[in-house]
Image (tube, rainbow, N blue to C red):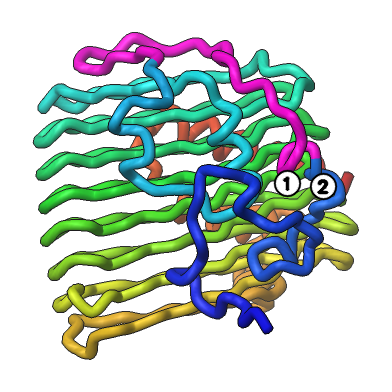
Amino acid sequence: MTVPVQVRSARPKSTNPADFEAVTGRELDWKFTPVAKLQELIAGELDGSRFDYTATVAAGVSLSWIPVTDPRVGTAGLPEDKASANAWAAATEVLLVSIASEDVSEITITRDALGTTHRAAHIVIEAAPFSKGTVVLQNNGDARLVENVEILVGAEADLNVISVQEWNDDALHLASHFSRVGRNASLQHSVVSLTGEVIRVNPSTVLAEDGSSVNMLGVYFADAHQHIEQQVYVNHDAPHTKSRVTYKGALQGKGARTVWIGDVLIGNKATGTDSYEQNRNLMLTEGTRADSIPNLEIETGDIAGAGHASATGRFDDEQLFYLQARGISEEEARRLVVRGFLNEVVQQLGVPALAERIEASLNAELEAGVK
């Protein structure tokens, strides 16, 4: 009898989709996902040719297409599920984003013309040693997309990567993000998911060398019949590493569904680790569901600290009372509470113009109310 995989670190890895069983929705990593809507992306034929994009000009940043045989491809991580492997096998070329400047550089890569073809994509973001940069992956329009994003952070580098999902309402998007952080380097990885029928972005980070650190942020807003999912993984594989994971979301409308699974592994070599993860969900109406599952796997007792927290609930009556006592209507008080709740994460994105636009989008969602 086959024993099911119990911990994230034991999941099999392969770039060949045939190495994974057919996805039924009963699997540990798929049991919260509406797999019936995604079978064409998980196991169907995908268009893996170059995708259209536009990009801002940034000093010290270059973009190019490289072959899938390039030695950098696969350095950050390998697929752990059939959909990721399907995209890996289908992609014919990889978009390479190279950051070489020691001065802070910022680039936005926008995809808004993918259409409704079932597509595969592969992106590698490479930050050279001592470099500093921000990469925004801005997603708009139609999409039937499954993709892999690899992030390589060289020694002493400081990289900020933000993935923004503002797809059309019927879009389907499955993404696996793999990050490897080098010696004394830092990565901030953020996922902003607002619109799309099904969005599943699973980021994983290996703190591979002494002194590496990661700050993983997420903010999401699910409307009626919308599914937003993120399975986050941090692997502390070296001494004196640090991680912080903060994901916050709000749900409104019947059938709104969010899933957050946070896995942290502190390996036997990761002495001096400092790790903390948290997920908070605010349910604005009846008929919503938020699944929140934090997990810790610790293989050494010589650590600075490790912890996790999860909370899902409705409005704080005391906050509402405080605002209403000062002449603010109940409806406006509720909006103010939600804005403050989500903006705590939005303000950490590190790109003021983007944060302002995301705040405006969230405000529009709140003012529109239940759809």
- Mark 2–mark 1 Cα distance, whole angstroms, equals 5 Å
Q: Amino acid at mark 2?
A: Gly
- SS category of the residue bearing label 1: helix
Residue shown at 60%/52% (left/top)?
Answer: 19
Q: Which residue is mark 1?
A: 366
Give x and y (percent) for residue 214: 29, 55
Judge whether 44 appears above or below 33 on screen. above
Answer whether residue 249 is magenta in the image: no
Answer whether residue 52 is magenta in the image: yes
Give x and y (percent) for residue 256: 81, 56
Q: Is residue 87 left or right of residue 178?
A: right
Give x and y (percent) for residue 23: 75, 56
Viewer-proximal residue among 337 and 98:
98
Give x and y (percent) for residue 167: 69, 30
Judge whether 277 appears above or below 127 on screen. below
- SS category of the residue bearing label 2: loop
Whether residue 54 is visible here, answered yes or no, is yes
Judge whether 65 appears above or below 106 on screen. above
Q: Which mark is residue 369?
A: 2
Residue shown at 81%/54% (left/top)?
Answer: 34
Q: Which residues are magenta?
A: 40-65
Whether residue 363 is visible here, answered yes or no, is no
**CB atoms of marks 2 and 1 within 8 Å:** yes
